[in-house]
Amino acid sequence: MTTTTSAAAADALVSVRDLTITFGSHIAVSELSFDLTPGRCVALVGESGSGKSVSARALLGLVGPGSRVDAAELRLGTHDLRALTAAQWRNVRGREVGLVLQDALVSLDPLNTIGSEVAESLRLHTGLAKKPAAEIVHGLLSRVGIRDPEERAAQYPHQLSGGLRQRALIASAVAAGPRVLIADEPTTALDVTVQAQVLELLAELKREGTALLLVSHDLAVVSELADEIIVLRAGAVIERGTPAEILHNPQADYTKQLLDAVPSAHTRGERLSPLPPAVFTRQRTETPAAEPKTGPILEARNLVKSYPVARGRRTTVLHDVSFTLERGKTLGIVGESGSGKSTAAAIALGLTPADSGEVVLDGEAWSTLREKDRRARRRSIQTISQDPLGSFDPRSNVRTLLGEALGTVGVPRGERDDQAVALLEQVGLSAVHLGRHPLELSGGQRQRIAIAQALSTGPDVIVCDEPVSALDVSIQAQVLDLLRDLQEQLHVSLLFISHDLGVVRHVAHDVAVMQHGRIVEFGETGTVFDAPQHPYTRDLIAAIPTISSPSLTI
Amino acid sequence: MSTLDQTEAPEHLAEVTETAAEPAGTEAATDPQNAEVPSVASLLAAASQTEEVSRLTRIRGIASYVGHRLLDIILVLWAAATLSFVALQLIPGNPLDKMLSGMQEATPEIRAQIAAHYGLDQPIIVQYLTYLGGVLRGDFGISYQRASPVTEVILSEIRPTAELTGWAILVAIVVSVLLALATSGRRRGARAFAQGFELIAVSVPSFWLGIILMTVFSFTLQWVPAFGTDGPGSLVLPVITLALPLIGVITQVLRERMEHVLHEPFVTTIRARGLGENRLRSRHVLRHASLPALTLTSVIFGSLLSGTAIIETLFARPGLGRVAVVAIQDRDYPVVLGFVVFAALVFIIINTIVDLLYPLLDPRLRGGHS
Amino acid sequence: MSLSLNPRLSGGRTPRVPRAERVRSAHALHPGVALSALVVLLLIVAALWPGLFTNQDPIEGDPASAFAGSSAAHILGTDQLGRDLFSRIIHGTVYSLSLGVGASLIGLIGGVILGVLAGYSRGIWDRVITRALDVLLAFPEVLVALLTITILGPGQWSLLWAVGLGRIPGAARLVRTQVLQIRGSGFIRSGIALGLSPTRLILKHVVPNSLGPVLVHAVIGVGVCIIFGAALSFLGLGAVPPTPEWGLMLSEARQYLSIAPWIAIWPGVFITLTVISVTVTGRWLQQRFISKRSSL
């Protein structure tokens, strides 16, 4: 197990041997060992519940209340971390080890300027006065790539872009000059182009001699930075090795599954999860029209949408957006946050009116209808959202959720339970889930319920708004497979909105790339990804961290 | 004011309210202690906070904000005056009878004369407009009992009440902040102590507490005078009595909010910098918790209003509360109504000031995102 | 807009506590809660059948035995008119409890109606009602109570309305905020997308989900109303003599503090005890039944 660590052990800044962390009877991590040396990066990778964050927190003494940390060795520099007093810990934190969390919007104190946030740990550990500290802060900010540091230092986190915020967070973590930096999902909340820049900054710190402990759920992100990857699952080390070993020659089945589950160009048309295909039957009982209709199932024509910002001012979130969704196909809409893709989805669903332009459903007017007239046709267009928990009435259980949806298409009360069970079975659940409350289900199960609910009206179109963004990669794989199965068997058309290019490339037949409320590129998926025409599309594709990135071929 | 419709709200608005409001679900999932019932005060605080936040986010620009607030003040004053006038009309019986109840032989001539003097012979609508006009000029009529203008009665009694409430609120804030700093997110014992104290503080009726304090410290120990306004010593017991329920409410909200904030990711960042727990609370967390505590203004104001009435009665101090109580007992309607309008005015002025404090405390509420 | 809307993973998560443990800690009957529930039960019995606890007359006393201390005949002693204090306190239970529950109910019902109207009206009505409610909310409870008593005159019934009406604005505000939040929430949007009718959405989803906080407000408000009612009686604005109302008893006892402090002490003890027990029990009930499934 420890073959790769022995060489470095002597000059290690951090040595961890047989780290075990328990919460009561729950074992969060067991027998984890690794070393951190200057200029090298160890990555802890795993899905939620793998214990990766908790392990990293052990180096800061911030595991949390009710926990028990045991180790044969837990050393940072000259400190034995197993026997530090609270005061000694405070001396270690910030000065010898820094922490970067995900999403600086919530990981920096939102009521403080970023200048004072960065200054805090600096002044705490150096005792500098305000004035000289301010100058060092400006230097730190420009070192992490923030231009106009004087001006930026006086701003608050919410006034900065996601990338700048994250840089400021990193500056605050390295302010007191720690030689060890822990980065816990440092790029997870960021758009893909910004993510690439932040990763580059971390790589720079590493080159300058910082020892980096990277914690991530994303193997691709990790592969660009790590010298050693440790794959964790439910607190146990599954596999460890260099990125090349782990990514190209994985030994453990779990690692292979994880890698297989990552959607990308190579996975098109393949199943991502080891689960067998689902079997679907069409829900709607009425006889289909004698003459099957032709032409696109959903068509958006010149959508324009703006919102009032302040008095008299409006901001336009959609400029002349048009797209077509063909019958039985999947149209992927990709874009970074704020690109207007979710607004487009809301208009397609008839939940938000467009200022001008219209959406046509199955050849008939849709978005321009009055809600009263639209309601009767809503059964043919359904939705799955990123946050199924938020889209379920908190007072409902699975039975009432599905029952109510079945009620909208006139299923009599007595038959609803049977049909609900049939739906549950189609999405890979069973009758036992009928009485469950959504809170009692896992994220993947909730998304399956959302799919069952959407299917209950026998829709022609399902609008999927970031349906897998909140899921672990192996669960994501299952849900993507499920969506593919239902499309193949029911010929449902999917409007698939996502920020994740890999996912879109895997599922979509056609792709629309959105930026600042405009569709900058629209076409067949293969064409768009292989021969992008618009510079923005090219930037996006270049920024995707890929497992087979050239930097890896050592 | 238009309602906040999330389906129509642009993304950044949704975000501001989102970050200001808390992700309740995650909290309940991570902390068993916080799965506990929220206090009414914190509910009210949360409710008004979301309202204030959305209101402030929507109303950008100082000019338009001031305009809205001025309109608010005028509307509330008008409503208070109108409600008061309606109340006056709803009171069964002729006000003249009450006014003349002390006089044995009121001839019809005298009645007519008095009616004319008080404008009671005019049609209702004229009386109403006269009353409104009076309110605008600060004239609430003449007290039936004291035979002096209501405004004069009220103004002459402001000082002792202001003194009492000012000290009480100062004491309450200082004690609450110290208690919240000392007990939020600490060991079980400290928490249990804080919760028990808060419960007792809000459950003990202040008039009874005053009596007990008086019995012990004035009658038995004779440390401080029980009644009157002689010297600073006479303020001690009334201030304590008035402050205690406030301490209960404010501590509860501060502590609950601080414990909530202690679970935010940025607290982990700060701890990882090596900042100690005390400084973490006093420099960062307290400020976050003070925002919802600010929205307790209406609760605090109401508590002070009823509190002064009780305490001024109990400790035989002069003051507005005492004036109002006596006026109701004596059916001195002009004074009662003048008091209502005056209190509503003070309340809305305080509310306006508090609203202006929000953006000072939370930069996210100062419009103009970049 | 550069702010990211995707909460892809929550940052800085603290480890999860197993669900079973959470449930246990939330539902366990704490000894304090059990004691409070017992006190509440006894108070209810005392309110309904005071004869079970005492056979002495609460109204007519023997002036000769005034200011008697605690004895076998008079457990808590007698008051200035020689009436048995314990009997008066027991017979006073019904006033405090019914006032607390009644006033809280008035506030709840009025608040829900106004709050839902304000939160769910559209167009011009939305503006009118919201505005009117804003103005009404600018009135502290006390002022509403004072105005009500001014109009109705002192007495038990006017006290009930005075305290109850004062609760309405606060309750309405809670409901309105909640309705506005629920209206914009994901599951209402998904209900619309599912094709549910507006009536069904309002009655089956918006309103029930909006009630959590106001129910808490009402449950805990019982204690608040008891104190407030007693305070008004203490000021001579509520119950009238010789009603054995606790606040009024305290007020009457004030003059005799130096010779018979117990006349003032015992009613206060009972008010405090009642409020604490009702609050603790109410919170537990609320935790158990109301907030279990609400989005609070």
Image (tube, rainbow, N blue to C red):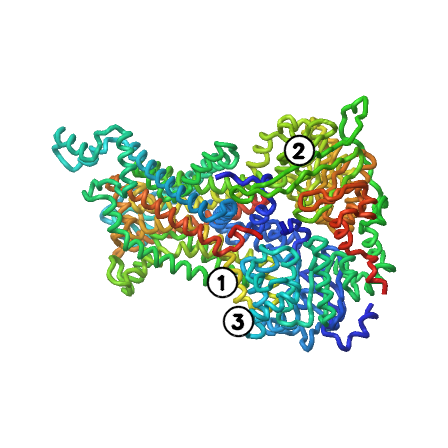
Q: Which residue is mark 1?
A: B181
Q: Are marks 1 and 2 on the same chain?
A: no
Label of residue A131 in the image: 3
**Does residue A435 show up?**
yes
Question: Which residue is labeled 2 in the image?
Answer: A357
- Which is nearer the eye, A167 or C102? A167
Image coords of residue C290 (percent x, y): 55, 43
Q: CA distance from mark 1 to mark 2?
A: 56 Å
The residue closer to the viewer here, C41 or A282, is A282
Secondary structure beneath disc 2?
Answer: strand
The amino acid on which the numbered mark 2 sits, given as a three-letter code, is Gly
Taking C105 as reference, is C76 left or right? Answer: left
Q: Residues within 10 Å of mark 3 (few under 14, many from 20)?
A: few
What residue appears at the point 75 percent right and 67 percent down from the top-left corner? A41
Q: Amino acid at mark 3?
A: Lys
Disc 2 and disc 3: Cα gap in Å? 56 Å
Badge 3: chain ID: A
> Is the same chain shared between marks 1 and 3?
no
Q: Residues within 10 Å of mark 1 (few under 14, many from 20)?
A: many
Instruction: Report helix, strand or loop for mark 3.
Output: helix
